[in-house]
Amino acid sequence: MHSDSTDVNELANFARQVGAQVLQGDLHRPSATGGWQLGDVDLAEYLDIYRDQPLMLVLVPLGAVKKETFTCGVCGYVMDEPQECPRCKFLAEYTTSIERGIQERKQLIEQVAASLSDGE
C-alpha cells in the first residue's frame, strides 16, 4: 500500500490536533531490547506507557519498502542477498582459464622446441 504524502501529512496533523502521538521512521528489528524499533523509538518501551489502556493504532506506510542490499567487499558489486559475488567468481574462473591456456601454450612450445632440438 502506498499513500499520498499530502494525505499522510493531513492525517498526522489531524491526529496531533486531537491529542494523538505521531511517530515516524523506518521500522526495523531488533531494538536495544530485542523488539521492534520505529526510527529511534523502542516500541516496547514506548507502548509500555499505554499498558492496560484502550488504544487505536493507525499504521500508514510512507513509501515503497526499502530492499536491503549487500556489497561485495572485494569489488563493490551490489547484490540482493548475501552470496558469493558472481562478478568475483566469474573473474576468478576467467583468470584461471587464461592461466591454464598460457601454461598449455608454454608446454606446447617446449614440446615443439624439444622435438626440433632432438631432430638436429
Image (spheres, rainbow, N blue to C red):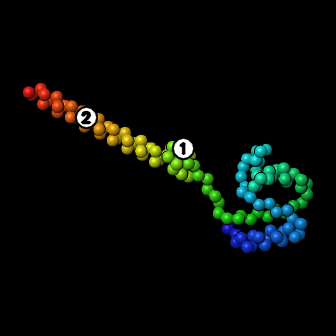
- Specify whether 69 is left or right of 31: left
Mark 1 or 2 closer to N-term? 1
Q: Give percent across and percent down for residue 102.
A: 29, 38
Q: In this view, does 42 lie above or below 56?
A: above
Confirm whether residue 41 shows in the render: yes
The residue depicted at 87 percent of the width and 65 percent of the height is 20
Q: Give percent across and percent down for residue 59.
A: 76, 63
Quadrant of the drawing holding the C terminus? top left
**Type of amino acid under label 2:** Lys
**Type of amino acid under label 1:** Gly
- Helix, strand or loop status at disc 1: loop
Q: In the depicted view, which residue is nearer to us: 22 or 110?
A: 110
* Residue 37 marker: none
- Specify whether 65 is left or right of 35: left
Confirm whether residue 81 shows in the render: no
Q: Give percent across and percent down for residue 97.
A: 34, 41
Q: Quadrant of residue 93?
A: top left
- Specify whether 87 is left or right of 115: right
- Helix, strand or loop status at disc 2: helix
* Residue 106 marker: 2
Q: What residue sits right under mark 1 in the picture?
A: 73
Q: In this view, does 10 lie above or below 119?
A: below
Quadrant of the drawing holding the N terminus? bottom right
Q: Give percent across and percent down for residue 10.
A: 78, 73
